[in-house]
């Protein structure tokens, strides 16, 4: 008999939907585990139910109604097979048994997955059944789908909260350095600038150029402090990340950059970027900076191919160009504040600004070599 042919089909679907709604309201993985096991016990009436969580490719038992199976123990071959194949697994006889459940006659393991990522495996074991038919398999697959969605949402919120806490700590350090630079060092540089300017007119022509070099260096340092201060003020004013329409932001950015630079060709299809992402008002500035860099730091005409890569709860926005590329030796430090390439005439704060913003949104930015031998900048954002 199929799941749909059962006499209580409508009632069971209604129960599954209620549990699905309750799972989506869970605030922690522990709540998801407890509610899922409750649903398995009530809906299926099997003696042994086990919730196996998957983190970083490792499987471990979180909780089980089998008193011989403790949290943290390996889940057994059936759960491992379901995880590796991404498919429901039914085992019978000795294949269904483990050291903790030697009296088992049949086992059913269902992977809880979002797209291709398995977040958990739900396992049922029976001491009387010779196997599990569709009346067990289909409902458990539906329940597993609800559990996977709930866990994925919780992990996304956890990552976003960690990013917020991290950026708050960084902001406090930046504000401290900003005060030191603007008030303490800034005041000293004003004194040096003033006295060196006066000194130029007091010394003979032979020694005047030394005074001029002192004056120029002090003035350049003062300008740098001002730029850092402006950057800090911008970051402090940035709103908290909230859902934003990615495609519309990119459309505006691409249009502006195309108008500003004649030598850049941008291959961009808005339909490929129909996502909602967590970000602030300055997300457009991140994309503008990356596209402008391609035009400014390459000679002659350049083509940038924009692409999107979708993951379970993330999306990567890529900018792959056919320019000169980025020297592998400087890629790791490219996004540090004030760092710039040997041939760059910029301030070195543009890409630092890009990284600071993307990390405040719970994402990051990296660079690699593009297929054309140029630079491929990748902005990872959390999906909303």
Image: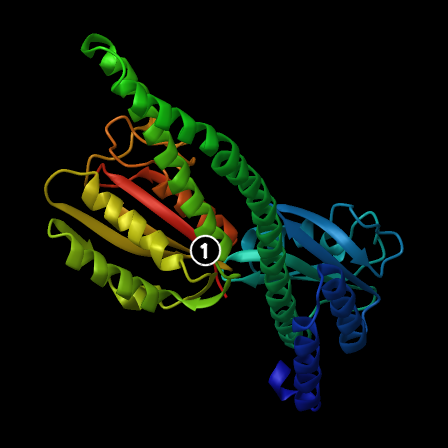
- Could you tell me how many numbered marks the image carries? 1
Which element carries disc 1, helix, strand or loop? strand
Q: Nearer the viewer, residue 166 or 310?
A: 166
Residue 308 in the image: state x and y as whole percent: 35, 57
Q: Is residue 152 left or right of residue 71?
A: left
Outermost right residue: 67
Residue 343 in sight: yes
Quadrant (top left/top right/bottom left/bottom right) for the N terminus = bottom right
Q: Is residue 175 left or right of residue 344?
A: right
Q: Is residue 224 left or right of residue 172?
A: left
Q: Is residue 173 above or below residue 91?
A: above
Residue shown at 24% from the left, 33% from the top? 345
Residue named by callout 1: 381
In terms of image quadrants, where is residue 258?
bottom left
Residue 368 in the image: state x and y as whole percent: 34, 38
Q: Nearer the viewer, residue 357 or 174?
A: 174
Q: Nearer the viewer, residue 33 or 138?
A: 33
Residue 300 in the image: state x and y as whole percent: 10, 41
Outermost front residue: 202
Residue 76 in sight: no
Display coloring: rainbow
Residue 11 in the image: state x and y as whole percent: 70, 89
Residue shown at 29% from the left, 68% from the top? 271
Residue shown at 65% from the left, 58% from the top? 120
| Label 1 crowd bin: few (<14), some (14–19), many (20+), radius 10 Å | many
Q: Is residue 3 above or below residue 61?
A: below
Outermost top residue: 206
In terms of image quadrants, where is residue 216?
top left
Q: Is residue 25 above or below residue 87?
A: below
């Amino acid at each position: 008999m199929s799941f749909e042919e059962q006499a209580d089909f409508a009632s069971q679907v209604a129960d599954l939907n209620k549990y699905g709604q309750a799972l989506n309201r869970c605030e922690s993985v522990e709540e998801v585990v407890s509610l899922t096991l409750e649903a398995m016990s009530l809906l299926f009436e099997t003696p042994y139910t086990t919730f196996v969580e998957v983190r970083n490719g490792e499987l471990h038992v979180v909780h089980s109604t089998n008193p011989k199976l403790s949290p943290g123990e390996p889940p057994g071959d059936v759960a491992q097979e379901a995880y590796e194949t991404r498919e429901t697994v039914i085992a019978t006889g000795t294949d269904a048994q483990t050291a903790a459940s030697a009296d088992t006659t049949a086992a059913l393991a269902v992977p809880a997955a979002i797209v291709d990522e398995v977040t958990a495996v739900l396992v049922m074991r029976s001491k009387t059944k010779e196997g599990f038919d569709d009346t067990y398999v289909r409902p458990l697959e539906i329940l597993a789908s609800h559990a996977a969605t709930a866990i994925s949402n919780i992990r996304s919120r956890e990552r976003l909260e960690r990013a917020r806490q991290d950026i708050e700590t960084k902001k406090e350090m930046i504000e401290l350095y900003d005060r030191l630079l603007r008030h303490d060092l800034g005041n000293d540089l004003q004194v040096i600038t003033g006295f060196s300017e006066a000194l130029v007119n007091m010394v003979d022509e032979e020694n005047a150029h030394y005074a001029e070099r002192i004056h120029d260096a002090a003035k350049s340092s003062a300008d740098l402090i001002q730029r850092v201060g402006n950057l800090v003020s911008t970051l402090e004013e940035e709103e908290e990340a909230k859902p934003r329409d990615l495609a519309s932001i990119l459309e505006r950015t691409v249009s502006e950059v195309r108008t500003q630079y004649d030598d850049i060709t941008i291959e961009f299809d808005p339909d490929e970027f129909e996502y909602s992402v967590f970000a602030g008002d300055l997300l457009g500035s991140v994309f503008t900076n990356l596209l402008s860099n391609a035009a400014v730091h390459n000679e002659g005409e350049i083509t940038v191919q924009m692409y999107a890569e979708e993951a379970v709860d993330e999306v990567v926005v890529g900018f792959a160009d056919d320019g000169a590329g980025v020297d592998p030796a400087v890629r790791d430090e490219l996004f540090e504040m004030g760092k710039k390439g040997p041939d760059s005439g910029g301030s070195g704060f543009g890409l630092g600004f890009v990284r600071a913003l993307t990390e405040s949104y719970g994402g990051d930015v990296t660079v690699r070599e593009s297929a054309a031998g140029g630079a491929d900048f990748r902005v990872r954002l959390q999906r909303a």
